[in-house]
Amino acid sequence: MPLKTSSSKGGFSAALLRSDLTRFWPLWAAYTTVWLLAMPAAQFLILFRRNGIWALDDMPARRLEAVDAALEAGSGSATVFLAIAACLFAMALFSYLTTARSVGFAHALPVKREGLFLTHYAAGAAVFLTVHAAAALLTLAVWAAAGVTQFWAVGAWFLSVTGQMLFFYSFAVFCAMFAGQVLAVPAFYTIFNLLAAGLTWIFNALASQFLYGWAYSDFPDPVRWLTPVWALTDGVYSSTQLDANNDIIGYTFTGLPTVAAYAAAGVVLAALALAVYRRRASETAGDLVAIPWAKPLFRYGMGFCGGLLLGMALYSFLWNQFSGGAVSAPAMAVCAVAGGLAAYFGAEMLLRKSFRVVKASWRGAAALCAVLLLVCAGYGLDLLKVESRVPQADQVRDVYFQLYGQYSSLRGTVEDPALIERLTALHQTLVQERPAEDTDYSSGVDCYASVTLRYALKNGGSLSREYSFAYSAADLKDNTSPAAQMAALFREPGMQMASLGGDLNSIERITSGELEYYFNYQSGGYSQDAAPLDAKQARTLLDAFVRDVQAGHAGVDAMDADASQENDYVNALRIYYVPKADPSRRYQQDSDTLYLSFTTHYTELLAELEKLGLKDDLITTAELDRRIGVDSGEPGSVGVYEALDEDMLYVPAEEDAIGIIGGADGPTAVFVGGAEEEEAG
């Protein structure tokens, strides 16, 4: 029977604590240096350096920057640093458990197991608490000298980094209790930190490969919470505070409740680590896994996860190279079994420290293969009926949608029961018909569409699906086809307003606008400029655009390629505005742009453009094609969309700035920023 050597004498050991602090001083010194540089030293440079963004007498701006820097030091990349440092702390302080000589000596000391654990644990905790406190006090001294009064920011930093370090350190110590080799500690620590997100990603990847319509949805909240680095980097951050003029007046810090929850979990993990340590046998030093009941978990966990990961890699490398895009669950099953056997026997070799493992563990390997085959069959046969799952309209609270036609797109959220019912009807049609995804130009199927639906259900659940398919002009005449249903949705004012509503609701104040126009047409090229609009004109045009959308003038030709060519204007209306402050955003924008595309059906907008004398500057896609000779067959001729890809990437510069693009009969000058019209060549 394994022995648990420990003395009945002694608890906490001050001598052992001093030994830990002196023995691993380079690690403590490195940790101290990082935080002294990141906090008091960085704060001193921000507040007192003579060369920088602000002059030395511009102290208010420097103070704001100092507060922002202090809060940033408690989030983001700091979380990653703390996670790494905590693992190094645990590896150093509990490394004696990984060699027989060291663990035998330690357990022969007149100190109980509890005393040994608490002493080593306290050494690491004492270091990071002392370092954090010293960095905070020095930072406060620098702030006091510079007149910074937002001392709460230093307190927020201290609580954030201390709470996070407590959790990661306890987690690393917990992992160290299972490791019989020192390098196994970071391996177990990394695996357990990423296990939930990794498994979710694997199952998502398999589902997207084999289940029709499966969408990579957001990771569920439990998965985020079980992935500490992700949850803390995403949930702990600073954000700006703005005044009525959108000027920065301060900062807020979000996430301390999250840190507190993880700190409490850290205390629990420390207690669990002590419970495991009390039952850990000294003789397991040197084993990869030091706890007997954890060895099957390691063996089968490595086999299962390794089988799916290696299986997907083999499937992608071998099957996808020769299948022509066709999926095969049997092929995936073969690859998964091959990867699973390799991972399972590899784990067994590490545990047994021998290459002769097949005879002793083939039964476990057979059980693992059966599980992997069942998983692959479940995906291939859709045993859970995922593909056919379409929620009832009355069970849906709202739907986020993305519809992409040949040249048009819509995205937004609807709550109207009538629109939800039409979206679920489209979803049901896609599930039943499963239209082909690949275009077939020889048969006239040359248009492409895609649908993304994310349902928020009334019971608190969610459902996400993505579909893409090809269609022809004939499909638009069949009212029951997915293409025809999408075309009807594009023409629906409620859908158009849902797509536009998010942009409209974010506008605080319109500042100006522009209408792009084109001129100097030549074979294969043209010139481009923009007519400026003041705030009142931009507001008038935006209001007219909204009236057109509400009247059903938008999306008329969204799915009809030929009609889109004839009726879509290539001109774009740009509305510049100041966005509303959004407390949920970490950084607030000072300005933003609303890009509006329109067609010949927008009668309200066209009437307003005519009043401004701008209607004559409009040109449709088909007309631009004709003017630049896209169908002439001349060498160098290009289509309008190809031309736009190149020519619209101009950068407005100072007056008379000139950019040159190539044309079929020589270079064509493109003038922006008010340059005179001129031709070269």
Image (spheres, rainbow, N blue to C red):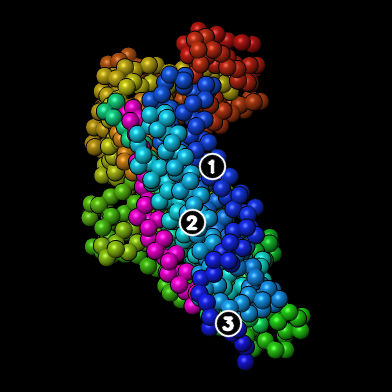
Q: Earlier in the sequence, mark 1 or mark 2?
A: 1
Reading the image, the residue beneath label 3 is 6
Question: Mark 3, residues whose alpha carbon is within 10 Å: few (<14), some, or many (≥20)?
Answer: some
Residue, disc 2: 165
- Reading the chain from its start, which is encountered first: label 1 or label 3? 3
Question: What residue appears at the point 25 percent right and 62 percent down from the top-left corner?
Answer: 458
Instruction: Point out the image quarter for the C terminus.
Output: top right
Closer to us: 65 or 135: 135
Residue extending furthest toward the bottom: 1
Name the kind of residue labelled 2 in the image: Met
Magenta-tinted stretch: 246-275
Q: Is residue 224 visible?
A: yes
* Residue 313, quarter of picture: bottom right
Looking at the image, residue 167 lies above or below residue 639: below
Identify the residue position indicated by label 1 in the image: 36
Left or right of 541: which side holds 347?
Answer: right
Q: Is residue 435 above or below residue 618?
A: below
How much space separates mark 1 and mark 2, taking CA atoms? 16 Å
